[in-house]
Image (tube, helix red, strand yellow):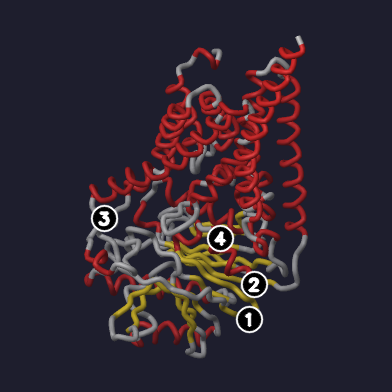
Amino acid sequence: MNIQQITKWKLAILTGVLVGLSYPPLHLGFLVWIGFIPLIHVLLNSKVSSAAKYGFLSSITANFISLYWIGFNSGAGFWVVFASLVAAVLYLGVFWAGMSALLTRFHLKTGKGIILIPFLWVAMEWLRSMGSLGFPWITLALTQTQFLPLIQLAEITGTYGVSFWIMMLNIGGYLTLTSKQRMKPAILTIGLFGIIWFSGVLRISDFDVKQNEKDFTVSVVQPNIDPNEKWEREHRLETFSTMHSLLDTALIDTPNLVLWPETALPAYLRLSWTARKPLLKRLKLYDVPLLSGTMDVKRDSIGERRYYNASILLNPDGTHKMYYKVQLVPFAEYIPLSGQFPYLKKLNFGQGNFNHGDEFTVFEVDSVFFSNVICYESSLPQLVRKFVKKGARLMTIQANDGWLGNTSGPYQHFELARLRAVENRVPVIRSANTGISGIILSSGRVKNKIPVYGRTVITETIFIPEDPSYYAVNGDKFAMLSMIISLLMMGIFPITDRLSKEQTLTHSRNDIQRS
């Protein structure tokens, strides 16, 4: 069917469906290679106001498909989580709408809108990741983790480079469908894909054969405990028994480190000697440290209690070190701006009222420096790279995806960990209460994992790369460059176009005067 014959709203929805289906766990990531072609056609043939509308329609379609799991969070009531889903989808739609309007406005003035697309998309993704409401979870790179060679570019550009070439493929596909000389864009598109793929294959082989002399053995525990029951009195003894049993299993292999998930026990481990004592007894016997998620509470300078979602490294000698979650989940762990306006804490959406940590903690075990992030933090590339830049050569993730059941959420959350491994060129070890726990190499390859609802322990030895990636050291320079190019193009091209028109008008007047 000729794309010209399909109504614009149908094309916008088609893009939304193709893009939405490309996200995990459906293994349809290839759909996004062509998924934006319908929307590109719409935006290059619309008015500005219509472009914003069609971009918004595409976005809410794609995000309802890919993020439906937000509405299945068992940690709050139905109407609260449904409202959260609707609010998130509408909020994210604003970014697509704004990008679409800018693109169409530029195209109407210059006729060159197609060259702006990849730069403007990257700029939009970058802006969408910022601030307390930042949401980089749905970067287009997440659709490509099943094609490991195609995400290796992220060690230089971050995930934004992957989004860039995805949009380039879509541009090539659009030109192949609509231009008179179809062979040229088709060949260039295939060539671009081939270069990215084969360079990625070579890069993976470098990491698969390069084995540093510094190796590290870690045991990952996934207890599969219902988070809705963990803190109930009648289930406490069962929870402690399960965790102690799994710890015993892990210690048999005498790893360098045992990793437990977020809020592993219904206790404040730093403060509760009763909860900590049986753990230290086991750790001392095997001379193995344990990193556990825990709740923590402190009093501030005026005596008020401050609660934290935290991690504690318990050493066999009885010492410990803490990490306090830096980036909390808005409207789930805190209310944005509640620090500036304390009365907002009185609002009750079923959320916790935690406090932010302010230190990017680096732990050390057997001369290996590593850092930990908690749950949602693993979706934030800028946050993770700060730990790596501070010296972490291994990242651990503690999560609790039990609230989401067997939806797309746990699968997407695990794939985000693979992106963090490639971006920073560090192994990533993930322990979820339930969800997907696993051991990911610095190439992004999964060495071992535990499926959703699994209750077990896995132990693997990994090799620690000596040096972080270019991205870990330099950050989002590619995204910044894309933003600058977008601004320059939107500023310069209309000016040069206007100057060209003025020159043409001047020449016409001169010709008239001569005649």
Quarter of image, res 338: bottom left
Judged by depth in the image, the label closer to the viewer, 1 or 4, is: 4
Give the amino acid at mark 2: Phe
Dot 2 crowding, Cα within 10 Å, few <14, some 14–19, many 20+: some
Looking at the image, do the residues carrying marks 1 and 2 touch, with CB atoms under 8 Å apart?
Answer: yes
Q: Earlier in the sequence, mark 1 or mark 2?
A: 2
- In the image, 439 versus 268, the foreground residue is 268
Label 3 vs label 2: CA separation? Answer: 39 Å
Residue at the spot of label 1 = 366
Q: Earlier in the sequence, mark 3 or mark 4?
A: 3
User: In which quadrant will I find the C terminus?
Assistant: top right
Q: CA distance from mark 2 to mark 4?
A: 26 Å
Q: CA distance from mark 1 to mark 4?
A: 27 Å
As shown in the figure, which amino acid type bears the numbered disc 1? Answer: Asp
Q: Which residue is mark 2?
A: 216
| Label 3 environment density (alpha carbons within 10 Å; few <14, some 14–19, many ≥20) | some
In the foreground, 515 or 188: 515
Q: Which residue is mark 4?
A: 382
- Residue at the top extreme? 515
Query: Quadrant of the image for the N terminus?
Result: top right
